[in-house]
Image: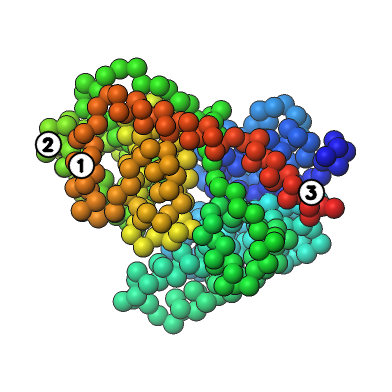
């Protein structure tokens, strides 16, 4: 590709503000694209390094902010919020006039409205989760309280998502599991590319362990923690290790319902500390101080749910103990990187306690190296950017 052919304007929108998506924008700017990267300015610390790290002059980051907070539980407020986000995205589109838009983690109604009003420009859906299946699962979990409005919501979300997927010029999905649902939806698989998520190797620091484990196992959990993740598992794991004299400690970096549950459920004797979300530099420090990283994903979780912090753990060279369905893509990555995966249940916790008891300094060191090597093999942003560049050029010609 010539440098002139790459002077294509691209609007990348990552609602969540993930570090790896900001890294991709940097790499796309480095190879010659003009990038405007927008994200929603959530309250709390910024997750990603939002700077033009290569000094290309071709990358701009733009925060989208609203007075209204993101509402996930109140349906009416959520719809109003998603309409407002759509208007903000359309404003950016009119101002920047990109040839291609790449949307990831964007609220469904916002993305659907955007596509509806920008039919002449090319749209790439970076499909991070299947919204309709996630909301359907949530509805089943609350089946005793389900009503006509909730059932209508499930049907509407599914219809919008199928329509959005169908109208997207290209789709990037994050695991092979998406292909099966696309077949059911009648999607042309020729427009789909599977690119697994990753974590930025130049931002997540790997600190090789240089000292013996003489003060007990230090555990960490970082990321989203809802009640659906069964946060009781974290408490039971620590108490199980403590009862066997392992002298564990657990740092939980999270906010919301799950963190509140932990705070209300732990006793003063439980070696568990809670932190709100932190800046990337502080997260690196906390990861470096930990021996074991914990990943949670509830039983029956969609195969499309892939916790992003799993990849951060691997980039940091952490030995991972996961409580998740074996069929999930994140579980497969953990196993490939030398970690352990257990059923997200009391039985799984008991098994995990016994396995952790067997770990010593040398085995931890070996597992950490396996995790980092997995990241080095799979998280090279240049390879990811090359795949995205091909997709962009295909729909730009």
Q: Residues within 10 Å of mark 3 (few under 14, many from 20)?
A: some
What residue lies at 39% left-to-right and 26% top-to-bottom?
288
Q: Which residue is mark 2?
A: 244
**Residue 56 percent location from the top left of the image:** 75, 29
Sooner in the amino-acid sequence: mark 3 or mark 2 = 2
Instruction: Say whether disc 3 or disc 1 marks the residue closer to the N-terminus.
Output: 1
Residue identified by numbered label 1? 353
Badge 2 density bin: few <14, some 14–19, many ≥20, Cα 10 Å: few
Helix or strand or loop: what does disc 1 sit on? helix
Q: Are marks 2 and 1 in contact (CB under 8 Å)?
A: yes
Residue 26: x percent and y percent? Answer: 67, 35
- What's the CA distance linking mark 3 and mark 1? 50 Å
| Residue at 50% in and 53% down | 69
Q: Nearer the viewer, residue 299 or 135?
A: 299
Residue closer to the observer: 110 or 321: 321
Q: Quadrant of the N terminus?
A: top right
Q: Secondary structure at mark 2?
A: loop
Name the mark on residue 301. Answer: none
The quarter of the displayed image where residue 276 is located = top left
Q: Nearer the viewer, residue 140 or 380?
A: 380
Q: Which mark is residue 393?
A: 3
């Amino acid at each position: 590709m010539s440098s002139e052919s790459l002077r294509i304007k691209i609007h990348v929108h990552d609602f969540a503000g993930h570090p790896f998506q900001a890294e991709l924008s940097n790499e796309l700017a480095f190879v010659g694209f003009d990038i405007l990267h927008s994200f929603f300015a959530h309250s709390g610390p910024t997750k990603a390094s939002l700077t033009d790290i290569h000094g290309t002059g071709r990358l701009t980051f733009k925060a989208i902010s609203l007075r209204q907070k993101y509402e996930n539980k109140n349906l009416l407020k959520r719809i109003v919020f998603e309409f407002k986000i759509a208007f903000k995205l359309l404003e950016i589109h009119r101002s920047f006039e990109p040839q291609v838009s790449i949307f990831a983690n964007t609220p469904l109604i916002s993305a659907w409205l955007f596509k509806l009003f920008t039919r002449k420009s090319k749209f790439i859906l970076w499909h991070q989760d299947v919204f309709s299946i996630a909301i359907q699962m949530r509805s089943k979990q609350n089946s005793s309280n389900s009503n006509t409005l909730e059932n209508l919501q499930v049907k509407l979300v599914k219809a919008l998502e199928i329509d959005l997927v169908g109208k997207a010029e290209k789709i990037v999905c994050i695991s092979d599991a998406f292909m099966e649902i696309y077949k059911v939806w009648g999607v042309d698989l020729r427009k789909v590319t599977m690119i697994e998520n990753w974590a930025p190797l130049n931002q997540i620091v790997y600190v090789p362990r240089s000292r013996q484990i003489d003060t007990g196992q230090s555990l960490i959990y970082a990321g989203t923690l809802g009640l659906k993740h069964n946060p009781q598992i974290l408490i039971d794991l620590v108490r199980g290790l403590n009862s066997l004299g392992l002298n564990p400690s657990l740092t939980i970096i999270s906010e919301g319902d799950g963190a509140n549950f932990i705070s209300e459920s732990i006793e003063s004797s439980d070696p568990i500390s809670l932190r709100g979300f932190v800046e990337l530099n502080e997260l690196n420090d906390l990861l470096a101080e930990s021996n074991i990283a914990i990943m949670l994903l509830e039983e029956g979780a969609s195969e499309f749910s892939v916790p992003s912090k799993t990849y951060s753990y691997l980039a940091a060279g952490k030995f991972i103990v996961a409580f998740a369905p074996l069929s999930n893509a994140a579980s497969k990555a953990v196993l490939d990187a030398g970690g352990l995966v257990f059923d997200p249940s009391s039985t799984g916790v008991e098994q995990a306690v016994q396995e952790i008891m067997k770990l010593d300094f040398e085995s931890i060191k070996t597992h950490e190296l396996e995790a980092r090597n997995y990241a080095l093999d799979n998280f090279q942003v240049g390879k990811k950017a090359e795949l995205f560049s091909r997709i962009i050029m295909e729909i730009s010609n």
